Amino acid sequence: FVDYGADRHGFLPLKEIARTYFPKGYTFHGRPNIRDVIKEGQEVIVQVDKEERGQKGAALTTFISVAGSYVVLMPNNPRAGGISRRIEGDERTELKESLSRLELPKGMGLIVRTAGVGK
């Protein structure tokens, strides 16, 4: 559980912790233990994935996403990226070519939203 400034602590599941928070040289032997990955008192950048509800605190993630009108930027998710499934045909091909020319920083992902066609 993470104190992120709200009345209740938020829940940060292991699967929502980006690899960048894992210790250097960490080797995976089966399922990792969260105590081996992050330590109490360690500062972690989180985003609320699901709001608090009832007696439960918010669900948190370290996979930050910043949604704009035309794109979604995912600064620490290198596997993220691509084009909305609703974009097809020549528009999709053009966007793929445009994306291939972009130089995103290492570890960053970008998704083109449907509204991004022709922009």
Image (cartoon, rainbow, N blue to C red):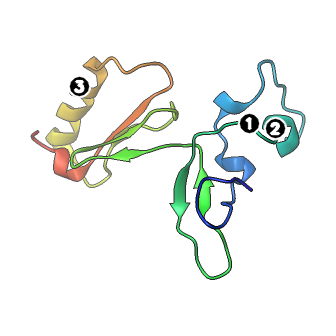
Mark 3 lies on residue: 97
Residues 57 and 68: in front is 57
Q: Residue at x 77, y 19 (%)?
A: 24
The C terminus - image quarter? top left
For disc 3, the neighbor class at 10 Å (few under 14, some 14 to 19, many from 20) is: few
Question: Residue type at mark 3?
Answer: Glu
Q: Residue at x 65, y 48 (%)?
A: 16
Picture disc at residue 39: 2
Q: Residue at x 78, y 25 (%)?
A: 23
| Percent of width and height locating residue 27 | 84, 26
Whether tag 1 and tag 3 are in contact, CB under 8 A, the answer is no
Mark 1 lies on residue: 42
Question: Residue type at mark 1?
Answer: Gln
The N terminus - image quarter? bottom right
Toward the bottom, the furthest residue is 54
Residue 33 visible from this viewpoint:
no
